[in-house]
Image (cartoon, grey):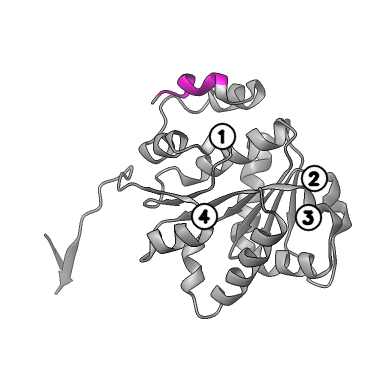
């Protein structure tokens, strides 16, 4: 699928940015669009690393923001990853959306976030913002959960599960986009999220498996 084939489905200012870097959409991106990504449908996307999951989230987030539907929260598991995503989004979308990073003091409600469109944060920080009853939370239209397979993590999983449960109750009409490179119970999780499942095995570099023994690698 060519990017120009969805030109009429996304805001012009977003298309003008993307066409400078993208000509052909990757398989997972095409599947997501066909399953209603640009129509507000919730999706659980399970594809290999570097297969284009982040752009799927960006399309949903920026379309919603530009069309005035509401804010996007982009949830990641680590502060370092949050900072990286924040820098990437600022570089690409700073002229069409107000982008903020919220990973600091968990005892603060961060009222300044009311003025921002795309908020990159961690699950722990967003959990704190909810507990502080940040009034801007009601304006969230899109929730992106990166590395959603960490729901199965003994340390971070419980916080993320509780957070998503609360968000689903608070934001009944929000579009939820879950992203994962690997997850064992994808169909069960998609059902819990009330999301369509997108699965694809395409990767930009072929994966080779082998065994290293005595300084030599034997590939299958």
The quadrant in which the N terminus is found is top left
Assess whether mark 3 and mark 2 are in contact (beta carbons under 8 angstroms). Answer: no
Q: Nearer the viewer, mark 2 or mark 4?
A: 4
- Magenta range is 2-8
Disc 3: CA contacts within 10 A as few (<14), some (14-19) or many (>=20): many
Q: Quadrant of the C terminus?
A: bottom left
Tell me if 217 is positioned left or right of 76 in this view.
left
Q: Main secondary structure of the magenta part?
A: helix
Q: Which residue is painted at 60% across and 65% down in the image?
A: 78
Classed neighbour count for the residue bearing mark 4: other residues with Cα under 10 Å, few (<14), some (14–19), many (≥20): some
Res 39 label:
1
Task: Name the mark nearer the viewer: 3 or 4.
Answer: 4
Question: Label 4: which residue?
Answer: 194
Location of residue 9 with respect to 33 vertically, above or below: above
Foreground tag (1 vs 2): 1
Estimate how packed mark 2 is, as few (under 14), some (14 to 19) or many (20 or more) residues with alpha carbons within 10 Å: some
């Amino acid at each position: 699928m060519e990017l120009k084939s969805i030109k009429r489905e996304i805001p012009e200012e977003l298309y003008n940015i993307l066409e400078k870097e993208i000509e052909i959409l990757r398989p997972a991106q095409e599947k997501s669009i066909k399953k209603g990504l640009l129509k507000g449908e919730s999706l659980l996307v399970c594809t290999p690393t570097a297969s284009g999951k982040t752009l799927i989230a960006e399309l949903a987030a920026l379309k919603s923001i530009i069309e005035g539907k509401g804010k996007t929260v982009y949830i990641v598991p680590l502060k370092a990853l949050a900072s990286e995503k924040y820098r990437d989004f600022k570089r690409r979308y700073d002229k069409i959306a107000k982008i903020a990073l919220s990973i600091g003091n968990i005892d603060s409600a961060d009222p300044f976030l009311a003025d921002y469109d795309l908020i990159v944060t961690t699950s722990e920080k967003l959990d704190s913002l909810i507990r502080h009853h940040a009034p801007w939370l009601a304006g969230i239209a899109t929730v992106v959960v990166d590395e959603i397979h960490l729901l199965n993590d003994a340390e971070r999983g419980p916080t993320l599960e509780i957070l998503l449960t609360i968000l689903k109750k608070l934001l009944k009409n929000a579009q939820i986009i879950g992203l994962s490179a690997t997850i064992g119970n994808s169909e069960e999780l998609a059902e819990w999220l009330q999301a369509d499942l997108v699965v694809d095995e395409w990767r930009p570099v072929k994966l080779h498996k082998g065994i290293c023994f005595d300084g030599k690698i034997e590939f299958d």
